[in-house]
Amino acid sequence: MQGARKDATGAYMEIREDRGFAGNPLMQTLEKVFLLKKVHYQDAHLILTFLGENLGRFSALAYQAKVSQKRGGGLLDYTNLLEIELSAQPKSRLPVVQNIQLQASFAYIRQDYERLEKTLLWFNFLNKAIQESQVIRGLFENIQSALARMNSPEEPTHVDLDFKKKLLTQLGYHFEWKYPDSKAINKFAQHHLGFGF
C-alpha cells in the first residue's frame, strides 16, 4: 500500500506522503501552520520546522527572520497559529518563507506556567514523532482544538490527557486500558516510540 505505514496493530495508518515543494520551482502557496522548531542560520536567518494544515511536517528557510516583522519578528511562538506564504527557490533545497501572518494567538497559555509547559512538551513530541512531509488526517485540527481548550479556564491536566490519547490514536497506537493517566501514557509512548512527552 503506497504512501502508508502500519501501526502497532498491523493496520495501515491514515497517512499521506506529500513531496510538497520538491521538484516544483514555480510553486507558491499559503499554508496555516504551527511552529515545531526553529534553528538559527547565519546571523539573521532561521530554518523553521512547521506542522502545516495541508503539507504536514516540513521545514522552510526564513531570510532575515530575526529582524523582519514580515518574516517572523515576534510571531514565531509555539502558541500562535500562523499563515505563511511560501515559495520555492531554484537554488534552495527548502521552500522560502515570504510572509507570516498571525491567525490566532493563545495568549492565556503563555501566562500560566503549567499550561505552557504541557503545550511545549506537545510540540517537542510532535517534532520527533512526525516525519518530514508526513500528513496525518485530523492531526492539525486536534492540535488547534487542544490549544483552544488549554487557552480556556478548563483544567489543564484533563486537556493534556485528552490530547495525548487522541494524538497516539492518530499515530496508530491503541490503548488496552480505558482511563490512562499521564504517567501511563508517557510510559506507553516511551515503549512504542522510544521517547515520551
Image (tube, grey):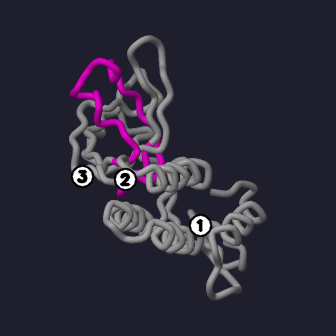
Q: What residue would you read off at disc 2?
A: 109
Residue 112 percent across, percent down from the top left: 40, 51
Q: What residue would you read off at disc 3?
A: 104
Q: Secondary structure at mark 3?
A: strand
In front: label 2 or label 3: 2
Residue 175 percent across, percent down from the top left: 67, 81
Residue ID at (36%, 57%):
54
State left or right for residue 94 relative to residue 73.
right
* Mark 3 surroundings: few (<14), some (14-19) or many (≥20) residues within 10 A: few
Q: Nearer the viewer, residue 142 or 3?
A: 142
Residue 87 percent across, percent down from the top left: 30, 34
> How far is disc 2 from disc 1 in space, using C-alphas?
35 Å
> How far is disc 2 from disc 3 in space, using C-alphas?
12 Å
In contact (CB < 8 Å): disc 3 and disc 1: no
Question: Height in image: 40 above or below 151?
Answer: above
In front: label 2 or label 1: 2
Q: Secondary structure at mark 2?
A: helix
Q: Is residue 70 magenta?
A: yes
Q: What residue would you read off at disc 1?
A: 4
Question: Height in image: 22 above or below 130?
Answer: above
Looking at the rendering, in which quadrant would you find the N terminus? bottom right
Residue ID at (71%, 54%):
195
> How far is disc 3 from disc 1 in space, using C-alphas?
32 Å
Amino acid type shown at disc 2: Ile
Residue 17 percent across, percent down from the top left: 51, 57
Image: magenta residue range: 50-79
State left or right for residue 53 relative to residue 173.
left
